[in-house]
Amino acid sequence: MDAASQEAFDRLRLIRSENIGPVSYRQLVRRFGSAAAVLEALPDLAARGGGRSPRVASAKKIESELNAIRKAGANMLFLGDRAYPSLLAELSNAPPLLLWQGSLAFIERPTVAMVGARNASAAACRFAHELANNLAQSGVTIVSGLAKGIDTAAHQGSLATATIGVIAGGLDVFYPPENERLQKEIAERGLLLAEQAMCTEPRARHFPYRNRIIAGLARGTVVIEAAPRSGSLITARLAAEAGRQVMAVPGSPLDPRSTGCNMLIREGATLIQSADDVLELIRHFDDRAEYTVPVAAFSDNVQGSSVPQRDPTDIPNTQRAPLIELLSVTPVSIDELVRQSGLSPQTVHMTLLELELAGRLTRHAGAKVSLAD
């Protein structure tokens, strides 16, 4: 196995290991320089956090997943690869790995997310289809989540030109089942993305993760019909937190499916009635982002002879203990922990990382953390 293949193998093994999430993955590789060095350092880091070493994915499991990826004609795209979407890489919890089928050329175009109700009205689906088609004809890629209703209409409207489907399960799992044909068409004519491993059946917890990818890929998100507390509003919130445009199509106050969109507009989202409205908003958005991960650790040309640099930070218990005392099962922002502890951000992040690897910490949306139950 050459150096590049070995590094990819080690990255996948790290990603599939216990207690390794998107945030911890990024921090670990930044500190240690390569996935192999991180795997070697895990026992010591977990011991500092007061727990056992995370269970590392076995080589047999990784070989099996790689075989499934090859069998499906899929590919791997790691965070830090040159082709990785720059807007998505801006997220602190950007997926360490995306599995994909189709053409990556579609992520090079300006991208707009379109989401909405699964039980959407016929009028809303028609509008979503026309809006997606008009935007795609204007050089915009449409990204959505392959759900019933608005998502399906958006994909169908942009399939002939430029569409990206982000699914919650594995690339080889069709969900919802009635969209199997559409999912296959997107893989052939557009771009299909998944964060989860092959053969993974989508669970409720997977959909918020999928939604962050949809919002992270796009300059802005358009919501067309959404009930309060729906997944579409989660996507809109994630877009706003990432500094992207949030747009909504107004609806009748008599239709509960319009409540979410009307609420977004009342709270500051831009009212959208046509493709021109969307194009005007995203026209001056700058897609060119700088990666915040080390090129040496994440690149298409891995140097197998490079020597990983270990993190010299060894936090004394006199600093670690007071920080842990500030934690509870109630989520708290990391910035608040820095403020109240009086410790440096580097010390706080390192301590939290050690606790996470030890299985004692849970990360939440909005850069918040809590003690694990």
Image (cartoon, rainbow, N blue to C red):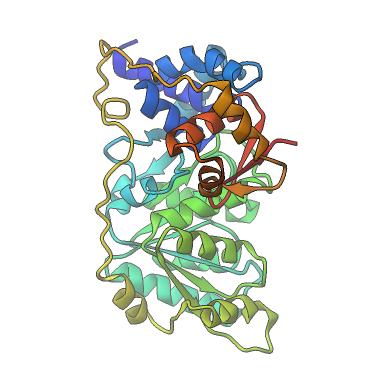
Residue 8: image quadrant is top left
Q: Is residue 230 left or right of residue 162?
A: right
Does the image show residue 182?
Answer: yes
Residue 369: image quadrant is top right
Residue found 39% across the figure and 82% down from its top = 274
Residue found 65% across the figure and 16% down from its top = 52
Question: Between 45 and 214, which is closer to the camera in this rendering?
Answer: 45
Image quadrant in which the C terminus is located: top right
- The vertical placement of 99 against 131, above or below, is above
Image quadrant in which the N terminus is located: top left
Q: Residue furthest right?
A: 373
Q: Is residue 290 left or right of residue 321?
A: left
- The vertical placement of 54 against 349, above or below, is above
- The vertical placement of 291 against 215, above or below, is above
Question: Between 7 and 76, which is closer to the camera in this rendering?
Answer: 7
The x, y position of residue 57, in whole percent, is 57, 18
Q: Is residue 195 left or right of residue 121?
A: left
Residue found 47% across the figure and 60% down from its top = 241
The x, y position of residue 78, in whole percent, is 38, 34
